[in-house]
Amino acid sequence: MKIVLGMVFLGLGLATGLDAGAQGIPGQQRELSKRPPDPDANLPPSPYALKPLPELKGVVSWKTLAEVKAVKQKDRFVPEFGKSVMALDRKEVRLQGFMMPLDMGERQSRFILAALPPSCSFCLPGGPEQMVEVQAKTPVKYGFEPIVISGRFSVLRDDAMGLFYRLTDAVAVTVPR
């Protein structure tokens, strides 16, 4: 019991920023002041965090892509897509969203387009119905603002990564707002 509670308190101490030396653990001292600053600590919250992106003419709505439900088949669940989603399969479409880079660099050839802005570098901002894997024809510049991408849309019925949608041969486009 003492070991478990000690681990809990140690976890609380580390989570609150207490120095491990203050926890009485020899050899585990560290200086918190030498940590690199968190680049996200001073960013203002995104204006898109609490409200959905505005609907744009000629751009597929995230409401449409959300027309999917999980259906049990044998021992697992598989996506069952609505008619409006299936009508987009293998068609050229435009999507609006936030870029989540998958590689390092200012320009991205493969990334996730998400309905919501990312709030953390390690967190996904929604379920698979709110994300599209994008494979760009030419690299797209990374930014925090929403972008519009055009490309060939695919509905993924059994993707190994759990994604529902992919956009290939994609290019960034400018749409009047």
Image (cartoon, helix red, strand yellow):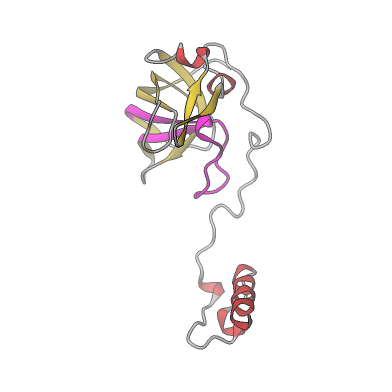
Say which quadrant the N terminus sits in. Answer: bottom right
Query: Is residue 115 inside the magenta stretch?
Result: yes
x then y, percent, for residue 12 = 64, 71
Query: Is residue 158 inside the magenta stretch?
Result: no
Placement of 11 over or under 114, stated as above or below: below
Residue lying at 68% horizontally and 31% vertically, measured from the top left: 51
Say which quadrant the C terminus sits in. Answer: top right
Residue lying at 38% horizontally and 19% vertically, measured from the top left: 151
Identify which residue, 53 or 25, lies in the foreground.
25
x then y, percent, for residue 50 = 68, 35
As drawn, the residue found furthest toward the right would be 50
Identify which residue, 86 or 10, lies in the foreground.
86
Identify which residue, 112 or 145, lies in the foreground.
112
x then y, percent, for residue 65 = 53, 22
Residue lying at 50% horizontally and 50% vertically, measured from the top left: 122
Q: In the rendered picture of this protein, how many numbered marks are placed on residues?
A: 0
Relative placement, left or right, of 33 versus 93 is right
In the rendered image, which quarter is residue 172 located in? top left
Relative placement, left or right, of 92 versus 35 is left
Residue lying at 44% horizontally and 35% vertically, measured from the top left: 112
x then y, percent, for residue 155 = 41, 22
The magenta stretch is 109-138
Relative placement, left or right, of 174 versus 151 is right
Identify which residue, 34 or 94, lies in the foreground.
94
